[in-house]
Image (spheres, rainbow, N blue to C red):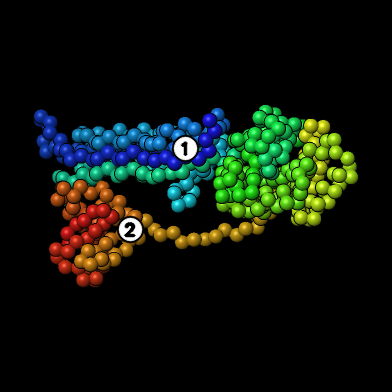
Amino acid sequence: MFVDKVTVKIEAGNGGNGVVSFRHEKYVDKGGPDGGDGGNGGDVVAIASENQDTLAQFRFQKLLSAGNGSPGAKRKKHGKNGKDLEVLVPVGTVFATSDGTVIADLNQPGTRAVIAMGGKGGFGNAHFASSKRQAPRIAEKGEKGEHIECIMELKMIADVGLVGLPNAGKSTLLATISNAHPEIANYPFTTRKPNLGVVPIGKDTSLLFADIPGLIEGASKGKGLGDEFLRHIERTNVLIHLVDAYSDDVAATYKTVQQELKQYVVDLSKKPQIIALSKIDGLDDEFVEDKLAQLRAVIPKKSPLVAISSKSKQGISELINVVQSTIKAQRNAMAKTTKDTLPVLTFQPKEDDWHVTKSGKVFVLSGKKIERFAMRTDFDNPHGVERLRDILAKMGIMRELERQGITPGQTIQIGTHKVEY
């Protein structure tokens, strides 16, 4: 079964807790702290594989989770790191959050991306030993791994996309010019899933063609097979729009498909297009010229127009040559645009940055670094809480709290944790 969009939950491993331990051995005087650090949680890593061609395995495997880190142990033993989870996905898979933010786009074979990072292991009390603090009773908790709900979407990597109404001859053309064997029949919606075919161009060059199910008027509103499969031509350089020569009104047919391309999430009608009048075998030249004239009246002047027959291969060589030259021009234009584009400089907040806001009688403290410290603090351990207060003072946060009028007994909230001033 061909599946190209699924929603899954991804959970990286939690870090292991550090431990409080002191060395106790016979004949060893004044054994010091020897609590080991916790192990790091495992990451969830996606890998683009050419051996995968669908997301079907994730229809029922809705949870992808990596291993948790183990806690530390006495004698400064480091906890075992959690095992990473490596997920093989088809080339062209995009990972995104529910609001559309792209996490990773695996558009090259072998590409690896960390989708969710495991939590860091907490430090044991051996880590905090110093000349001033010779018997620390502090150990950190391991950080939580990232938990996200993720949309996995497969967008095929192809050079050319074939579009048109159902039964316009897209599958027949793909079977004629490539190594693909799509289902072909004399009725609409024969193609019910995207098909790919490699088309040789010269001796050492080839192009990848993608054939998607036909579009009908109202496809963007879910009619027919809808426009769900249009995602597979988002990445293409060029579209070949096939128009059936037997259509009563080829101009209206062309406009119908263009309207559906335009109403997609991304305006695909702006892509370079080659218009191909198909199924001209057995038709007289005057009839074909009349149909071509009707199309010339509505298509953009820059769009090439050819007449073809996949069965008799009439016009196929001309079509391939036009495709090759159009793709070459498109790639040159893209390369020039990339070269001429100036980088956009943005200012990212620093990890040490923090911000204090007052909500009623609670002082809310936010900031990446301080929130991580709070997450790793064992609030059941008074020594750990005292260390957090020391960190607040060293970072200048206590001074800001006093400036905003905090009084003893009021609450400081850091992330989901609360501590009394």
Q: Is residue 296 left or right of residue 263?
A: right
Give the numbered dot on residue 367: 2
Give the numbered dot on residue 46: 1
Q: Secondary structure at mark 1?
A: strand
In the depicted structure, whether residue 343 falls above or below residue 222: below
Looking at the rendered structure, the kind of residue marked 1 is Ala
Looking at the rendered structure, the kind of residue marked 2 is Gly
Name which residue lies at 44% across and 59% down: 348
Name which residue lies at 19% across and 57% down: 419
Q: Residues within 10 Å of mark 1 (few under 14, many from 20)?
A: many
Q: Is residue 27 left or right of residue 219?
A: left
Q: Position of residue 173 (x, y in %)?
A: 73, 35
- Looking at the image, which is closer to me, 27 or 163? 163
- Looking at the image, which is closer to me, 322 or 310? 310
Give the numbered dot on residue 308: none
Q: Earlier in the sequence, mark 1 or mark 2?
A: 1
What's the CA distance linking mark 1 and mark 2? 29 Å
Q: Position of residue 184 (x, y in %)?
A: 68, 30
